[in-house]
Image (cartoon, rainbow, N blue to C red):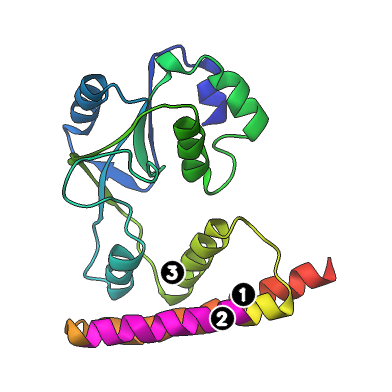
């Protein structure tokens, strides 16, 4: 993606992940709205496609990649899985990519959104531009995905033993909270998954601590 961006001369740059399926009017809707709203970065609404798999259903509820059913000006960030960028107002975009390694690390969508907001650019979420996530998880892959989500959200911080224990306790509290919600909402198929995620999360997080301790 970085190589492509070095050669692109177009005003608009569309980005989707490899496991995303677009609805036919996705580009048209986002291009129209980014012009109409004067936004620099715009994103659509992504649903999980294979929710008959309970692990994917869990992800659709707790790791969803959309901001809901209504359009939104200035969302917290634009999800990197599907978006269109208007480069017209970013005179130093090439320098920004070079300095910050844009598109080379996980979490670049939050990082880039924050950069745009800091420089007074408008972000916009268009709920009618729909796409679907084709990812199909199992317990271990979903746990790894969720751990990465927490880790990058925490700023890629190294963890000592105390922080690791606190992190696992925090995750246990989340697991109990989710399980109570699932019982009240009759989402009983998600109960087992909550604890599968907690089990693998704890192992992954402790292994991460041990690896960093030895480096």
Q: How far apart are marks 1 and 3 (CA)?
A: 14 Å
**Considering only order in the chain, which callout, 3 or 1, is on the residue closer to the N terminus?**
3
Query: Which quadrant is the C terminus positioned in?
Result: bottom right
Work out whether 119 lies above or below 182: above
Disc 3 crowd, CA 10 A, few/some/many (<14, 14-19, 20+): many
Marker count (numbered): 3
Residue 10 position by quadrant = top left
Q: How far apart are marks 1 and 2 (CA)?
A: 8 Å
Q: What element carries label 1?
A: helix
Q: Distance between the residues labelled 3 and 2?
A: 17 Å
Whether the residues at callouts 3 and 2 have beta carbons within 8 Å, the answer is: no
Whether the residues at callouts 1 and 2 have beta carbons within 8 Å, the answer is: yes
User: Does residue 16 appear to the left or right of 140 in the view shown?
Assistant: left
**Considering only order in the chain, which callout, 2 or 1, is on the residue closer to the N terminus?**
2
Work out whether 33 lies above or below 164: above
Work out whether 14 lies above or below 192: above
């Amino acid at each position: 993606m970085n190589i492509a961006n070095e050669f692109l001369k177009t005003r608009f740059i569309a980005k989707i992940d490899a496991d995303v399926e677009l609805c036919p009017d996705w580009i048209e809707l986002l291009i129209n709205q980014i012009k109409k709203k004067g936004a620099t970065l715009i994103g659509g609404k992504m649903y999980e496609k294979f929710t008959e798999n309970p692990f994917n259903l869990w992800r659709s509820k707790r790791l969803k990649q959309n901001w809901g059913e209504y359009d939104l000006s200035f969302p917290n960030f634009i999800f990197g899985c599907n978006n269109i960028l208007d480069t017209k107002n970013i005179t130093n975009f090439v320098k920004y990519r070079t300095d910050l390694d844009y598109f080379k690390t996980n979490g670049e969508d939050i990082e880039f959104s924050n950069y745009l907001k800091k420089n007074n650019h408008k972000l916009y979420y268009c709920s009618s531009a729909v796409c679907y996530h084709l990812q199909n998880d199992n317990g271990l892959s979903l746990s790894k995905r969720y751990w990465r989500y927490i880790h990058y959200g925490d700023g890629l911080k190294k963890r000592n033993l105390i922080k690791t224990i606190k992190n696992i306790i925090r995750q246990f509290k989340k697991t109990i909270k989710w399980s109570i919600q699932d019982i009240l909402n009759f989402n009983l198929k998600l109960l087992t998954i909550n604890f599968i995620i907690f089990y693998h999360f704890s192992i992954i997080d402790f292994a991460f601590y041990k690896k960093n301790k030895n480096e």
